[in-house]
Image (spheres, rainbow, N blue to C red):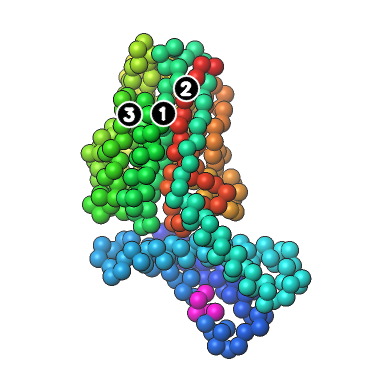
Amino acid sequence: MSMARRILIVIGLWALLHLYVGQRLLAHAPLGPVERLLGWAAILLLALAPFGAFFAGRVERVPAKPVLEWAGFTAMGLSSLLIVFVVAGDVLHVRAWVGAGLFSAGVVGGAVAVLVAGSWRARRPAVVRVEVPIQNLPADLEGFRIVQLSDLHVGPTLKRDFVERVVTATNGLQPDLIALTGDVADGLPTVVRDEVAPLARLVAPYGKFFVTGNHEYYWDPQGWVGEVERLGFSPLINAHRLVRRGGGRLLVAGVTDRSASHRVRGHASDPVAALAGAPDSDVKLLLAHQPKSAFAARAAGFDLQLSGHTHGGQYFPFNLLVRLFQPFVAGLHRLEEMWLYVSRGTGYWGPPLRLGAPSEITLIQLVKA
């Protein structure tokens, strides 16, 4: 299916959903002609605002660009919540119990309240501590601390101040190694460079490593690889590095994004290639943006994979629906002899909203099984 056709389908579905919301909220509510007209104007504005945000993000010089992006993505979140609330209300026949006017006011008020609470929470990632038991782990790797950052999505609504808070929190955990598992930003490196600059202050004695996510390929993949390398990270493009602590040997490998890396020649995701020529090691760690890489990683002989991409669904009900498309959504999973940890993401994409899927800075500690 061509990209243009996909876009038309999305626009058509989005328009139909807003017509549905407008009809359910306005058609039977006790409103005068002027109030009803203003209500439909607000619905139209909600429907169009996200497209304005996407347009502003792709064009370098747009008047009031930050305002357009904030307003557009916030409108997307509010629209999503209104759709969910209206559908839930219809399924439960709430209008029949409370009346059309109270139903409409309750839906709008509830959606706005949830949006405010979810927006506040989205910008405050919590530290999640995870112990991963490894068979025959050498004593010198016992307690090895890996901080995983994923899906920062710096750009339209997440700026330098957010990155600075993430850096301060991460350094406070005193990691041995830092893993940045893709989707660093939404925007061109030349535009977002100042916003991501604090990542250079991240400190880890055994290295900072980066793998590409799908969003790097939507902008400038080669540019982002170079930019993150300039910030002190080692990009792993289907490659590996050996880390030694005392007598312990940790092999850190990384693959490119599974779904979008075909856009760049030589970037096709390949866990086997990431191990090519690897020396002997006690633990094999794979950084892979998409959890779906885990099946190939298990076959290749990795002990642990760290991934992101899903955002844990980001907000209800998508944190439930994402399970239809992803075999692993969040948290620690066991695949035969391999462990997989899926981060809910440190930032967010699109609507500045987290609900039922909190953002995280993940501290992974290796322990002896």
Tell me the residue that label 3 is attached to: 204
- Please give the range of residues in magenta: 39-43
Tell me the residue that label 1 is attached to: 146
Question: Callout 3: few (<14), some (14-19), or many (20+) C-alpha neighbours within 10 Å?
Answer: some
Residue 68, x across and y down, in percent: 36, 67
Residue 195, x across and y down, in percent: 29, 50
**The stretch drawn in magenta includes residue 14:** no
Marks 2/1 in contact by CB < 8 Å: the verdict is: yes
Indicate the amino acid at tag 3.
Answer: Ala
Q: Secondary structure at mark 3?
A: loop
On screen, residue 266 versus residue 146, left or right, reads: left
Residue 274, x across and y down, in percent: 36, 27
**The stretch drawn in magenta includes residue 40:** yes
Q: From this viewpoint, which residue is outermost toward the bottom?
A: 33
User: Residue 253 versus residue 98: which sits nearer the camera?
Assistant: 98
Quadrant assignment for the N terminus: bottom left
Q: Residue at x 48, y 63 (%)?
A: 76
Residue 78 versus residue 204 in the image, above or below: below
Indicate the amino acid at tag 1.
Answer: Ile
In the picture, the disc for residue 366 is 2
Q: Secondary structure at mark 2?
A: strand
Confirm whether residue 357 shows in the render.
yes
Residue 234 versus residue 74 in the image, above or below: above
Q: Residue at x 36, y 57 (%)?
A: 156
